[in-house]
Image (cartoon, helix red, strand yellow):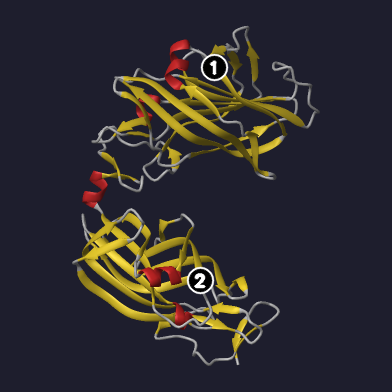
Amino acid sequence: MMKNVYKSGIFLVLCLAALLLVFGCTTPGPATGKLVVGITDATADIENVSKIEVTISQVQVQSETEGWITLSSTPKTYDLLQLKADGTTVLLADANLNSGAYNQLRLVISKVMVTDANGTFEAKLPSNELKFAGGFDVNAGKVSVATIDFKADRSLHVTGKGEYILAPVVHLKISKDSSIEVNVDEELEIEDGEIEVENDQGMDINGNVEIDVEIDENEELEIDDKGKIFSKQEIEANGRIVVGITDAKGDLNTVTSIMLSISKIEVQAAESTEGWITISSSPQTFDLLLLESQQKTELAADANVEAGSYDKVRLTISKVEVTDENGTTEAKLPSNVLKINADLEVNASTTAVAVLDFNAGASMHKTGDGNYILTPVIRVTTKVNADVNVKVDNSIEIKGGTARTDNEVGMNAEGEVNIGAKIPDNAKIIIDERGIITID
């Protein structure tokens, strides 16, 4: 079998060798191998760009039995175009691994700097996590090699304002029972074994990496004030949903803070058979009493979705912390999932908005032994064709639009959410040893 010397292009080399002594390592046992990661460049010239400096802060692989395994956590910076010009492959990481099955490779990219005729600028990535699917085996006493060949010319995009976006496109090849050598110039010579995976993978505008995916070179991309990447064509064809969180006034006696943490926000299309659509998966925490005192509505989700009717909003609440004169304690919820019926009509190139106005005074309850329970009571209002302005402090201003929903919903002790439901203020509430809430 012929040896291939990778001297052009950008690629990452993952080599697992039980008997590999190339880097002065001791020979591992028969059930382990060595993973070596290198980086180089095999891409066409990019007009007007002289440098693309990528800083990789972490390299990991995922084992079916051990989970994610870190190969390197030392940040390293590479000029992709210089690697191409020099025709070199540079070591990125190496580590001993147990033999077995591995199903994913992940790079964490902390920064990308692009230099052109006007200076050096930081590029925006849809996601700093580049996670490739593709299973491969590590056999005892054998070598597995993965090459990740970056296509810089297909990865780099420019907005109408001249801002750079890097959405990586790579060619992934993984082979087992291979071999690797390093010459005097530290260039890697790879002899492929049995190829297990070979495909192109790319990152879309939302940061997802999939096979045969890339952002079209003619796509008109922009970056908003929050750093979010969006496609002008997509906005024209789709609509926008904005979800805001606020708090109505309520009497909470000695409570000074209610910190509500939301890990996910989803919507569901009316009569949909495709399930829930995630419009925010970034954990967020809102101080309900601060929102009430400042009389502001804070942005919770802002996403482009397919035009159509949506009739449900779902919040996943990860934690509620209550502060009073005795300190801070975690409140109990009957359910961490808050599913709300709401009429959201999303028209193309327009904005639909839902405001969830928590009534903290009606939502918060206290047991006889001093524990707090939150059974959310919320006024839900929605509008179609609204004008929504997101301010620098993350508050939103809503103008115009046509009202669609104006209901008060509440959660009962079983965690169900219905119009008009709430637990009475004078109810005797008990949390048993299993954490189950009952009303006596």
**Number of numbered labels in the structure image:** 2
- Expressed as whole percent of the image width and height from the top left, the position of residue 197 reads 54, 31
Q: Secondary structure at mark 1?
A: loop
Under mark 1, the amino acid is Thr
Image height of 368 relative to 173, above or below: below
Q: CA distance from mark 2 to mark 1?
A: 53 Å
Q: Kindly give the residue lying farthest to the top in the view shown.
A: 184
Residue placed at 33% from the left, 80% from the top? 407
Q: Quadrant of the N terminus?
A: top right
Residue 147 located left or right of residue 408: right
Q: Kindly give the residue lying farthest to the right in the view shown.
A: 29
Residue 236 showing in the rendered view: yes
Asked which quadrant contains residue 47, the reply is top left
Image height of 228 relative to 193, above or below: below
Image height of 235 relative to 386, above or below: above
Residue 310 showing in the rendered view: no
Which of the pair 296/215 is nearer the observer? 296
- Expressed as whole percent of the image width and height from the top left, the position of residue 142 reads 71, 25
Of callouts 2 and 1, the N-terminal one: 1
- Expressed as whole percent of the image width and height from the top left, the position of residue 195 reads 57, 27
Residue placed at 74% from the left, 17% from the top? 24
Q: Quadrant of the C terminus?
A: bottom right
Under mark 2, the amino acid is Ile
Which of the pair 125/227 is nearer the observer? 227
- How many residues crowd around disc 1 within 10 Å: few (fewer than 14), some, or many (20 or more)? many
Residue 337 located left or right of residue 344: right
- How many residues crowd around disc 2 within 10 Å: few (fewer than 14), some, or many (20 or more)? many
- Give me the disc on residue 258: 2
Which residue was labeled with disc 1? 89
- Expressed as whole percent of the image width and height from the top left, the position of residue 228 reads 35, 46
